[in-house]
Image (tube, helix red, strand yellow):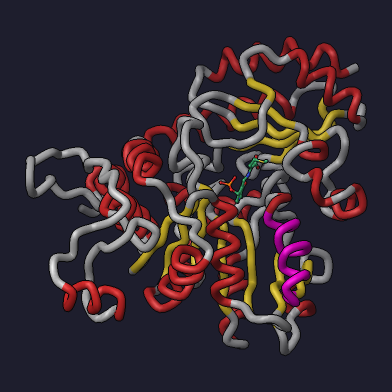
Amino acid sequence: MTHLRTRAVHAGQHPDPHSGAITTPITQSTAFDYGTLAQGAALFAGTAEGYRYSRFGNPTVAALEAKVADLEGAPAAVAFASGTAATSAVVLGLLSPGDEIAFLGPLYGGTEALFRSMGERWGLRAVDATQQGLAASLTPATRLVWVETLTNPDLRLHDLAEVVALARARGLTTVADNTFCTPCLLRPLELGIDLVLHSMTKYLGGHGDATGGVVAGAAPLVAAVRKTGLAHVGGNLAPQEAFLFLRGIKTLPLRMAAHCAGAAAVADFLAAHPTVRAVHYPGLPTHPQHALAQRLLQGGFGGMVGFELARNERAAAAAVLDALQLFAQAVSLGDVDSLACHPASTTHSALGAELRAAHGISEGFIRLSVGIEHPDDLIADLARALQHAV
Ligand code: 3LM
């Protein structure tokens, strides 16, 4: 299986040994019969492989972990109940009080808020390296470097080769949140990143019906994250949700192609519209990192589009968003349905006005998650709504 489209369908899937079922069954069981005391003791001592209790592992969840690991080119993966559970498992699993996380922002507002509030309460310092650059932000206490492969909400990229080179020279662990790109567009581990993370809630699931997260990378790192995130914190993914992600991922490459084509058409439309002062889409030749995007991304520039209204104020954003009919006004992203939101008052509200201003998230910024509907219908909806922007 060499092609991603084939692996998206088949990886992690084996006919059920009892029934021959092709689709991975939902193993809805809390505990597993290990038969003998000796086997139970070996499972708990970690000297035998097998299932014992679904907080530690479950066959449906394991099939999903194997599928994601395969698509990201990772030796191992561990699934969680949300992307945020995955993020906190990495932070709590790999860091100790006194350690620092250097991040290139902006990040999803919840991730940055987690680093700054929960992290700092537990003695972890979050260092925002966005302005002064990573090299100048690293200290002897830095342990982790965190980036998003396409930043939320403004669709910037980082030169991952540079990030890896800097981190490797100092023995730091790198984490790339690949939620916006998916392994269809970019596989960070191939570039030397240590751990890749997804909110599966988004493109991997793809249908807006399940919440989940995953971390993939080298086996010892994933084992540390697994132990903290599952055994200690209990953030395990439910088997029914794992089933939805297994099904969703089968069509991921097809959906991503449609998301990318739709977003490119929407970005072109917005770039020519008189009420729009800036469009953030890495596929546009005017994007400051278009050349880097061409180098890093394969097969498209993603399904997310950000834009800023010429009348750069909340009232203008509200007038446009409230007038949309086909786009749902909602947070989240990566669904087959198109979604639109106002990051300053929703996804990035927890940051506060000062940090948002530092990241350039203005009151007139609107974020679109372009679904798989026909782009002409989406553009007609935007054209109608933008009449309210003046
Ligand atoms: C959002 N983002 O609308 P969950 N990493 C990235 C993300 O965008 C997100 C997470 C992790 C949004 C969610 S806002 C209330 C809704 C790049 C989530 C966290 O824990 O599965 O939501 O993933 O931008």
Of the four image quadrants, the one with ligand 1 is: top right
Q: Is residue 365 magenta?
A: no
The answer to whether 157 is drawn above or below residue 272 in the figure is below
Please name whichever residue, 201 or 311, is drawn nearer the observer in this view of the structure: 201
Q: How many marks?
A: 0
The answer to whether 370 is drawn above or below residue 123 in the figure is above
Question: Left or right of 300: which side holds 383?
Answer: right
What secondary structure do most residues of the magenta stretch adopt? helix
Which of the 4 image quarters holds residue 47? bottom left
Spot occupied by residue 104 in the image (x, y as percentages of width and height): 71, 64
Quick check: can you spot residue 253? no
Quick check: can you spot residue 138? yes
Question: Left or right of 198: which side holds 170?
Answer: right
Q: Residue at x 71, y 44 (%)?
A: 153
Spot occupied by residue 168 in the image (x, y as percentages of width and height): 56, 83
Magenta region: 111-124
